[in-house]
């Protein structure tokens, strides 16, 4: 059974530098504030375990994800450039139709793509 779900999720994982947790958390607040008004963002949040962090993000479609990256791009570059955290893994999930729209614009991030083949969305 194929799916007609157009939702796209992105899962960045970060390693937070020693003594950098408070600074990282302040960046999380800034990211959440910027993202809250995005119309195609379905959910967004950071989870932290020790010196590792994960951002859980879902968008209505590929265009929503691209709009998000455009919205937070400057802040993301600032955070990564500050050395407070490094991006250790990036996964993008969605239907092949939606992922095809992301492969070229995201190639510099070198994500792993996971093709959604079966399922449903309510």
Image (spheres, helix red, strand yellow):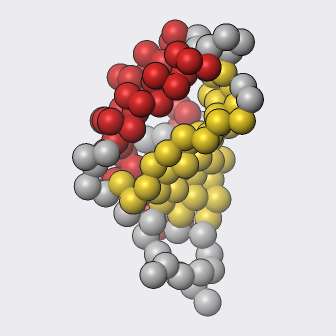
Residue 105, percent from left and from top = 43, 41
Q: Tell me which corner region of the image, top left, top right, bottom left or bottom right, holds residue 59.
A: bottom left
| Image: 70 above or below 42 | above
Q: Tell me which corner region of the image, top left, top right, bottom left or bottom right, holds residue 73.
A: top left
Q: Nearer the viewer, residue 100 or 89?
A: 89
Q: Quadrant of the C terminus?
A: bottom left
Residue 74, percent from left and from top = 35, 22
Q: Nearer the viewer, residue 105 or 120?
A: 120
| Image: 65 above or below 47 | below
* Residue 115 as seen in the image, left or right of residue 104: right
Residue 111 shows in the view: no
User: Which residue is the extreme one toward the bottom?
Assistant: 1
What residue is shown at x 56% (from left), y 18% (from top)?
22
Residue 11, percent from left and from top = 59, 46
* Residue 81 as seen in the image, left or right of residue 21: left
Residue 38 shows in the view: yes
Residue 31, percent from left and from top = 40, 33
Q: Quadrant of the N terminus?
A: bottom right
């Amino acid at each position: 059974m194929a799916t007609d779900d157009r939702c796209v999720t992105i899962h960045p994982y970060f390693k937070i530098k020693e003594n950098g947790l408070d600074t990282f958390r302040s960046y999380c607040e800034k990211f959440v504030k910027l993202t809250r008004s995005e119309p195609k963002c379905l959910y967004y949040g950071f989870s932290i375990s020790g010196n590792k962090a994960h951002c859980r993000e879902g968008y209505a479609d590929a265009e929503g994800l691209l709009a998000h990256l455009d919205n937070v791009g400057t802040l993301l570059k600032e955070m990564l450039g500050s050395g407070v955290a490094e991006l250790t893994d990036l996964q993008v999930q969605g239907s092949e139709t939606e992922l095809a729209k992301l492969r070229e614009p995201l190639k510099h991030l070198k994500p792993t793509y996971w093709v959604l083949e079966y399922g449903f969305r309510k």
